[in-house]
Structures are given as C-alpha cells and as structure tokens.
Amino acid sequence: MPWINNVFYDLTEAPTWSVDWSVIVGGKNRTSAMRPYLIDITVTDKEGTSSDTCSLTFDDTDGEIDLDMEGLDLLVRLNGIAVFDGVVETARSTGSRGGGRLIPVTAKSFDTRGKAKEAQAFHRDHATLRDFLEEAGRRAGYTISVDDALGAIERDYWSADYENFLDIGEKIAREVNGTFKIRGRQAVLVSRGNTELPTVHGIVGPNGNVITWDLAPFTGRPAYTKAQARYFDREKARWVTQEVDIDLGRDVPAATHVTRLPMGDRAQARRRAEGRHGEAKREAGGGTVLLDLTPEAQAEAPFVLSGARSQVDGRWRIVDVTHTANRGGGATTQLGVKEPGAK
C-alpha cells in the first residue's frame, strides 16, 4: 500500500523551506512526495536515559496521507546530515472544527514493539561486563558495542532479575558513569565524555550562530564534596565504605552523596562512588543554548561558547539536542548543556 497515493500535484506551488531536508521511509526516498504536505520536523537526541525521537507533521486537508506506516524504518536528513535513524511508532489523525486536519507522525530510535521491553532473568558467573551485556543484547535481538575500559570489568556474578534490556543497560551505565543508547538494532555503552564526536561551537555577537542562551555556571542541590558506597567484606565480616573526594572547582559546604544500596565487593563500591563523582561534576551547572540549525550537533559532544561573558564562556557537555525546522519558517538547534569546564 503506497504511503502517499498517486495524485498529481504541482511542486512549484509547494511552500519554501529554508533548510534542505530529506525523508526515507521503509528504504524509499519519499522527499518529493512529502513536499506538498510536510509542515514541520522535530528531532530530539538525548544522552542515553531515553530514546531519541522524531516527529513529522503533515497537512491532511486533502486526505491523501495513509496512516498505515507502523514499524517502517525512518531516516531523516537536514542539510545532508543524518539527524535521525529509527522506526515509526505511531501516526494519528487530528483536527478540529475550523482548525484544519493534521497527521502527526512519531518515531523512536528503536522498535518499541520488540523484545527490548521483554523482562530477562539470567546470570553469568566469572564473566566480564561485555560478556554479560552481549548475552542480554542477544536475548533482546540487539548487538552491542562496549567501551574497552568498561567491557573489561570482571565480576564473579552478574544477574538480570526480571529486567528488560533497556533497564539493564541504564542501570549499569549509572553505576559505571557511562552512557547507554540504542539506535536501530545496535546498542552502545561508553564512558561519559569518552567520545570522538566533533566539537560544536557557539558564537555570540555579529555573524555569530547563537540566538539565545540561558546558562548557570553553578547550581546548589547537586553539589557534593564526597561520594560514598559500601560493601560487605566477607573475610573481615564487617561493612566497609569506599569514599571518593569530589572537586567542583569552587568552595561549597561539605556534603556527602551516599549510595543507599550496598555493592557486591570493593571494586564495585569504588566504581559506584566514582560514578557519583562523575554525576556531581556533570550536574555542577547547566542550561540551554539556541543556535542556528547545526545538524552535526549530538548528545555527549563538547560545546564551546564564546562571546557571552567570562563565567559562562568555555567548554560544556551537550546532554540533549533538539533540531526544529518548518516550512515557511526557519530552522534551529537547541542544546541542553551541563558540566561546565568539561574535558
């Protein structure tokens, strides 16, 4: 069943876009067929705690849009750069009396209908983190790439206690201060900040690309000076606490971030405390920056701001990206940033 029926239309009358875009659905380029109907594009790329998303809004005045697109692959490019690769989740018909008719289409970076949400119950003895995650991925139908430093972590016992693949990946990512993501049929776990993504630059002033900014160089509640995690030492028959100092680069009142649940051994407790250290550094400051369309921007990439003021200029870490484009209007990229002074 064709996605858009074979109806003649004059492309010369289509509204003008300020950005070059293309949309591939189910492996077929539908850009020309969509041009008379597509109203806007919104793509969100996040740091890993939730799925990347894409939304397309179509004019349904003529009733030519077919809603039968569930599960189709969707690839979106802006100015020739792929900003989204995922699967169509839903298409809806919306409208109101006197308000017109629209078809909002939403997609996610992985197929939410599949086995990623299926609970798993298994364990691995004397295995590495890579071995454990590869097993969890295989059971869910995914391949996974694990950062070498994280993949080499070895334990006597790993377990999935009726958790789905998403929960397993995100739980481990929090523990080891990593980022877990799924795109298509591929999952990835990397150390936070350990990426080769290109640096995004924001320039305030004449001929600059910054439209607005709203940044706090420091915040109060996430500020800690120490992180603690505990484990039970079987040989000594007592609880032992692992502690890590946190240097935020400024003087703050002493406060310790204590991990509530006990860890399995000394190494795990140490990694959890160091993970809290990384979280505290990331949450030390943050805000948003709105740029002219920058399709190469991705979550976890470094961001360097210049021309705003001394206390906010410099390096940050991008935690989420939202690309927005609409016909007859402009195209922008909004960055959510944290970790002032990011390496």
Image (cartoon, grey):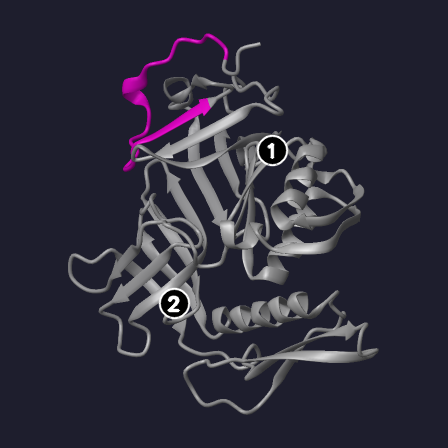
Task: Give the labeled residue for mark 1.
Answer: 94
SS for dot 1: strand
The disc labelled 1 sits on which kind of residue?
Answer: Thr
Estimate the x, y position of residue 106 in percent, counting from the top left: 56, 35
SS for dot 2: loop
Left or right: 121 as drawn, with respect to 179: right
* Labels 1 and 2: the sequence-earlier one: 1
| Relative height, residue 286 to residue 244 (above, below) | above
What residue lies at 79% left-to-right and 73% top-to-bottom?
232
Q: Are the two marked residues, 1 and 2, in contact with CB atoms closer than 8 angstroms?
A: no
Task: Give the labeled residue for mark 2.
Answer: 342
| Relative height, residue 15 to residue 197 (above, below) | above
- Quarter location, residue 14: top left
- Between the residue at mark 1 and the residue at mark 2, the CA separation in whole angstroms equals 43 Å
Closer to viewer: mark 1 or mark 2: 2
Q: Is residue 98 visible?
A: no
Estimate the x, y position of residue 265 in percent, counting from the top left: 72, 67
For residue 183: magenta? no
- Quarter location, residue 37: top left
Quadrant assignment for the C terminus: bottom left
| Relative height, residue 155 to residue 105 (above, below) | below
Quadrant assignment for the N terminus: top right
The disc labelled 2 sits on which kind of residue?
Answer: Ala
Instruction: Specify the segment rendered in magenta.
Output: 5-24
Furthest residue toward front? 235
